């Protein structure tokens, strides 16, 4: 049965691989692509198409992505509005997380030395509690990964929950509640983000507190065992009785405090914890990547994708939405979705 499933997945994959569209490289048909880089400069890509999770890689920013491979078929895969598969990588492992419509979050782990993907492992230890579909994963050290998601356990109110894997995504710890909103629920329609390095774990989420939909950051200094009180980001507030559908991102480099990016009304901001926010433009679906000497922020606005490097003016990457970016070798590798195609381009410093 497993052999037959592998054959079917590869046949499906061969029907969606494509070449170039309008001068930008189209990798394949798919939705919600996400890219990350590893410590050796390789780029790793994940995206969803129907109920199939696809993965591709590039040795560096100067080489093209490999033909995507089908990692797994997850019936009723959620892949809309930033709810798609997520990815993190270390020297030893690549871990992909994905959620289905029933509200279960699964991990798939690639042992990079053996070149073999694991079967699905459920991360949430209470079934069907991740029904909103928003989740994220981050590397912390060679074997350790941290995952977080919106969770309905106990009271059917969304809260921030996390789990830790210490064996490259093969097994996961008991789930831990990071934050409950005193107003009853965190924002139920915005993506949660996570960044980690060794024992430091940062989780960013949009809160729903006293009628405001502001971004908050939770920090753990002991690998996620305990968290300091969540800290509001920025000095402004957004009073809103609706769902913004936009959660931003948090990212870490090897030096300095974390960088957060997010939206309030139509304005996009960058912000360091404890500092004032800095406006960088207008739009939606902002995310970022950092290195010791470089910062790249991408977003979409009125059907166009934009990239801002450091203090430079934003540049237009082309038509599309829902971008992701990874920094490596003084280059920004960007991916996004356009008319059901996964697009990519590389911008050099």
Image (spheres, rainbow, N blue to C red):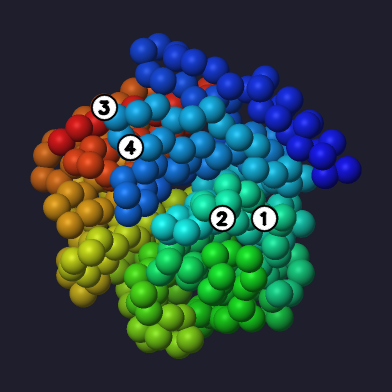
- The answer to whether the residue labelled 1 contacts the one labelled 2, judged by CB atoms less than 8 Å apart, is yes
Residue at figure coordinates x 60%, y 38% from the top left: 54
Among numbered discs 1 and 3, the one appearing first in the sequence: 1
- The answer to whether the residue labelled 1 contacts the one labelled 4, judged by CB atoms less than 8 Å apart, is no
Name the residue beneath numbered marker 2: 111
Residue at figure coordinates x 67%, y 59% from the top left: 106
Judge whether 224 appears above or below 23 on screen: below
Name the residue beneath numbered marker 3: 316
Distance Cα–Cα, label 2 vs label 3? 37 Å
Nearer the observer, disc 2 or disc 3?
A: 2
- Looking at the rendered structure, the secondary structure element under dot 1 is loop
Q: Residue furthest right?
A: 1
Distance Cα–Cα, label 1 vs label 4? 25 Å
- The answer to whether the residue labelled 2 contacts the one labelled 4, judged by CB atoms less than 8 Å apart, is no
Residue closest to the eye, 86 or 228: 86
Distance Cα–Cα, label 2 vs label 4? 20 Å
Residue closest to the eye, 206 or 160: 160
Q: Residue furthest left?
A: 311
């Amino acid at each position: 049965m497993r052999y037959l499933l592998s054959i079917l997945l590869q046949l499906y994959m061969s029907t969606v691989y494509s070449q170039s569209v309008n001068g930008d490289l189209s990798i394949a048909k798919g939705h919600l692509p996400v890219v990350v880089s590893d410590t050796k400069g390789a780029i790793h890509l994940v995206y969803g198409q129907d109920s199939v999770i696809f993965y591709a890689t590039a040795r560096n920013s100067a080489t093209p992505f490999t033909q995507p491979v089908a990692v797994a078929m997850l019936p009723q895969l959620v892949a809309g509005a930033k709810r798609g598969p997520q990815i993190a990588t270390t020297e030893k492992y690549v871990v992909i997380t994905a959620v289905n419509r029933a509200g279960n979050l699964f991990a798939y782990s690639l042992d990079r030395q053996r070149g073999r993907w694991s079967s699905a492992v459920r991360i949430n230890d209470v079934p069907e509690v991740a029904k909103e579909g928003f989740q994220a994963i981050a590397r912390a050290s060679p074997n350790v990964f941290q995952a977080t998601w919106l969770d309905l356990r106990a009271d059917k109110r969304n809260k921030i929950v996390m789990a830790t894997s210490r064996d490259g995504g093969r097994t996961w710890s008991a789930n831990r509640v990071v934050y409950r909103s005193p107003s009853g629920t965190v924002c139920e329609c915005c993506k949660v983000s996570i960044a980690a390095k060794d024992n430091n774990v940062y989780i960013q989420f949009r809160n729903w507190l006293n009628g405001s939909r502001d971004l908050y950051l939770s920090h753990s200094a002991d690998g996620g065992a305990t968290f300091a009180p969540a800290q509001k980001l920025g000095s402004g507030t957004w009073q809103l009785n609706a769902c913004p559908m936009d959660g931003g991102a948090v990212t870490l480099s090897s030096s300095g405090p974390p960088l957060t990016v997010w939206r309030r009304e139509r304005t996009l901001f960058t912000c360091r914890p404890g500092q004032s926010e800095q406006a960088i433009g207008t739009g939606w679906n902002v995310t970022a990547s950092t290195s010791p000497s470089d910062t790249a922020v991408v977003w979409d606005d009125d059907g166009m994708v934009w990239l801002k490097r450091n203090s430079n003016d934003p540049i237009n990457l082309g038509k599309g939405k829902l971008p992701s970016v990874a920094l490596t070798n003084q280059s920004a590798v960007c991916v996004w979705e356009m008319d059901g195609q996964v697009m990519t381009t590389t911008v050099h410093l």
